[in-house]
Amino acid sequence: MGYAAGSNTLIEYVARQGLLHFFPWRLFKAGDAGRLLDVASDGVFALAVGSDSTALPFPAAEHRVYRRHAKEPWQQVDTGLTTGALEAAVWGNGLFVLGGGNGDLTDPFNISQPLLMRFDSVHVGADPMGDFRLPCWGEVEGFDIDDVRVRVHALAWNGSVFCAAASDKVYRSVNDGLNWSLHAVPAGMLPRAILARGARFILFGEAGRIATSDDDGQTWIERVSPVAVALHGASQNGAVVVAVGEATGAGAAIVSSVDNGVTWVQCANPENLALRGVAALSSSRFLAAGDYFSPDRAYALLGSPQADQWTRITIPFDLRAEQVRLLGKSVFVPGGSDDPFGAPHRIAWHDNFR
C-alpha cells in the first residue's frame, strides 16, 4: 500500500483536554534518497514536495512531488521537469503553487533562479498530471543579475494574492501565479517562512527577524523580535501566531503574538532542539516538530506556547521533520533522514488528528 513496513501500528497516548487519545501515525518512504520539505492540500489531494538531495542547499538537485488522494497510497508525480529543488507548496483559488530554486547554488559560475510552478487543482488526479504549468521564473517581472542564487523558501495565499518568500526578497502574484513581481523586504532580512490572514502577510527570517505587510505584500514593516536565531516555521489561528526555529542555548526558539504579528514574546521550550515547523490546532494548542530526540525518533511537542505548557510526542520513525501542516483533520510531517548512505524521502501523517 506504499507504507513503510510496521509503520501503521504506532499508538501514542497524549494527554489532551484531560483525556487520553490514540494517535495512529503512519509513515511513507519513497524509493529514492532525499527530503520532503512541504505539503499542501485542496481538501481532496495532498501534495508533498522536496528534492532528491539530502544536503542543503540541494546542489544541482532534481525535485520530487508526491500526491495522495483520500486514504490511498502516495504516488510520485512527473512534472515534466528534470532540475530544480522544491521547498514550498500552497493551494489557493483552485491552484497548487510550488516554489524552490533552479540551478546549482554551490557553483559560483552557475546562474540559478527562483523556481515557481503552478497547476490546476481540478486536474491533479488526472494521468498525466493535467494542467501542470512550466516554471514561471521566466515570466517573473524584474528578474536581473541580482536574482541569481535565489530560491523560494515559503509560499502563502491570502484569498486573492500569492506571496513567495525568497532568499532576500518577496515575489507577489495577483493573477494566480502566472506572473510574479519583485518586492523588497527590510534591509538585510533573509525570509524563511510566511503566513497570510486577510490583507496581512507575516514574514519570518534568519536572526529572528519578523516583518508584516498590510498591502498584500507590497511593502513591509519590521517588528521587534525577542529572539536572534532563525525562524523556520509559523502558523496562525485567528490573531494568535506562533513561530519556531533554531536552538537558542536555553531551548529552541518559540515566539508568539496575540495581535496578528505586531508584538512578540518568547515562549519556553522544554527541549534544546531545533524546531522546523508548527501547526495551529486552535488558538491555544499547537503542534511543533523538528530535530531528533534520538537517532531514530522524531521530535514533536504538543501544547500551549502562551501558557508554556508542552507535552512531548515521540514519533518512532527515523524522521528529521522539516515542516508541520494541519490540512483539514490531517496532520502531515514531511522530512528526511541523516543517513549518510542516502535515506529516502519520508512523510509521517495522521488522518484524524483533531
Image (spheres, helix red, strand yellow):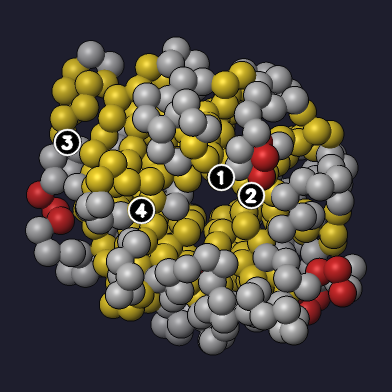
Q: Earlier in the sequence, mark 1 or mark 4?
A: 1
Q: Earlier in the sequence, mark 3 or mark 2?
A: 3
Q: Is residue 266 left or right of residue 334?
A: right
Q: Are marks 2 and 1 in contact (CB under 8 Å)?
A: yes
| Residue under the image location 55 percent in, 62 percent down | 87
Q: Residue 234: x, y in percent?
A: 56, 38
* Number of the label disc, if any, that sits on residue 12: 3
Residue 44 appearing in the image: no
Helix, strand or loop at label 4? It is strand
Q: CA distance from mark 1 to mark 4?
A: 14 Å
Placement of the C terminus among the 4 image quadrants: top left
Camera-side mark, 3 or 2: 2
Q: Of 300 and 228, which appears nearest the observer? A: 228
Q: CA distance from mark 2 to mark 1?
A: 6 Å
Residue 50 appearing in the image: yes
| Residue under the image location 26 percent in, 34 percent down | 313
Residue farthest front in this picture: 249
| Quarter of the view holding residue 132 | bottom right
* Number of the label disc, if any, that sits on residue 192: 2
Q: CA distance from mark 3 to mark 2?
A: 31 Å
* Number of the label disc, if any, that sits on residue 320: 4
310, above or below 131, in the image: above
Helix, strand or loop at label 1? It is strand
| Residue under the image location 30 percent in, 55 percent down | 319
Q: Earlier in the sequence, mark 3 or mark 1?
A: 3
Q: Amino acid at mark 2?
A: Arg
